[in-house]
Image (cartoon, helix red, strand yellow):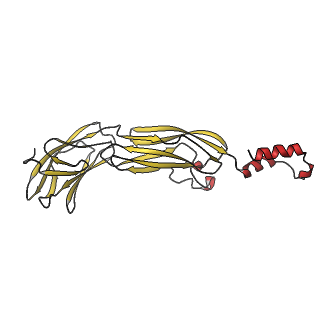
């Protein structure tokens, strides 16, 4: 319990004057909740955590010029539940506070802005996702396309087979962020492929996307003349030439 009314100021993640049994935020398993307390112009100069959280949780206290921060790291396998802490801020005054936070799934989400794209073989096709963080903790999203690695390299097979083809994005608390996935189709025609967005260790969202890759001019000519012996166009009937150029430019 507090020894006085409105005596401890919490700045983040929720700005409030602590009274008793105060809610200070919600977060997903695997994230870190950052609490920022004001020193109130020298009234406090230290903070002590009096209670213990379950096994797997980790708490750290860091002192700054005008604030004191408490970092609560939540284990990836944390049970969805309400967790409490008792704190003491000391200095010219000494005050206690009882606070609680909630750990739960469903705070992170993702949406797809464009499902389909058209491009040429070996040319880029981009898809934009919106990542949504409704928690009070910064969190990381992981986005991966279920495609051969060389479809994710600008240079195709000449690219880096050992490169990291998973996109990692940090999204600040209570915010959204757009991220673009770019692929480079290596064959022509339509292809359906999946993209997985990992939200938490136990939550993911899967999207089915489509790309329609057209042959380039060079690719078309290579296909047409592959295996045909050299000969003069003067020997080709005019209706064959019409068919040839119709294929090239469609």
Residue 75 drawn at (x, y percent): 31, 44
**What is the quadrant of the N terminus in the image?**
top left
Residue 22 sits in which quadrant?
top left
The number of numbered badges drawn on the structure is 0
For image coordinates 45% across by 40% down, the residue present is 111
- Relative to 123, is 242 on the left or the right? right
Residue 109 sits in which quadrant?
top left
Of residues 217 and 191, the one drawn nearer to the viewer in this rendering:
217
- Relative to 199, is 189 on the left or the right? right
For image coordinates 52% across by 54% down, the residue present is 163
> What residue occupies the far bottom of the structure in this picture?
65
- Relative to 141, is 217 on the left or the right? right
Of residues 88 and 236, the one drawn nearer to the viewer in this rendering:
236
Residue 203 drawn at (x, y percent): 40, 38
Tell me, yes or no, if residue 231 can be seen here.
no
Of residues 41 and 99, the one drawn nearer to the viewer in this rendering:
41
> What residue occupies the far right of the structure in this picture?
235
Residue 193 drawn at (x, y percent): 56, 39
- 212 in relation to 164, above or below: above
Tell me, yes or no, if residue 199 can be seen here.
yes
**What is the quadrant of the C terminus in the image?**
top right
Residue 197 sits in which quadrant?
top left
For image coordinates 13% across by 44% down, the residue present is 19
Of residues 223 and 174, the one drawn nearer to the viewer in this rendering:
174
């Amino acid at each position: 319990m507090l020894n006085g009314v409105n005596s401890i100021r919490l700045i983040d993640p929720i700005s409030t004057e602590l009274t008793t049994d105060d809610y200070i935020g919600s977060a997903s398993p695997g994230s870190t909740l950052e609490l920022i307390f004001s020193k109130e112009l020298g009234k406090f100069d230290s903070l002590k955590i009096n209670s213990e959280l379950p096994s797997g949780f980790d708490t750290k206290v860091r002192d700054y010029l005008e604030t004191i921060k408490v970092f609560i790291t939540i284990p990836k396998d944390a049970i969805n539940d309400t967790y409490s802490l008792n704190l003491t801020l000391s200095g010219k005054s000494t005050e206690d506070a009882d606070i609680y936070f909630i750990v739960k799934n469903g705070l992170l989400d993702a949406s797809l802005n464009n499902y389909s794209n058209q491009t040429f073989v070996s040319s880029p096709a981009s898809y934009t996702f919106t990542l949504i963080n409704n928690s009070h903790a910064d969190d990381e999203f992981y986005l991966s396309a279920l495609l051969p690695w060389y479809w994710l390299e600008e240079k195709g097979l000449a690219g880096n087979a050992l490169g990291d083809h998973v996109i990692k994005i940090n999204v600040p608390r209570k915010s959204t962020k757009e991220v673009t996935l770019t692929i480079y189709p290596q064959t022509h025609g339509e292809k359906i492929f999946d993209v997985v967005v990992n939200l938490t260790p136990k939550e993911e969202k899967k999207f089915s996307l489509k790309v329609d890759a057209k042959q380039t001019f060079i690719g078309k000519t290579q296909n047409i003349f592959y295996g045909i012996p050299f000969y003069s166009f003067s020997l080709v009937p005019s209706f064959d030439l019409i068919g040839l150029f119709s294929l090239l430019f469609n």
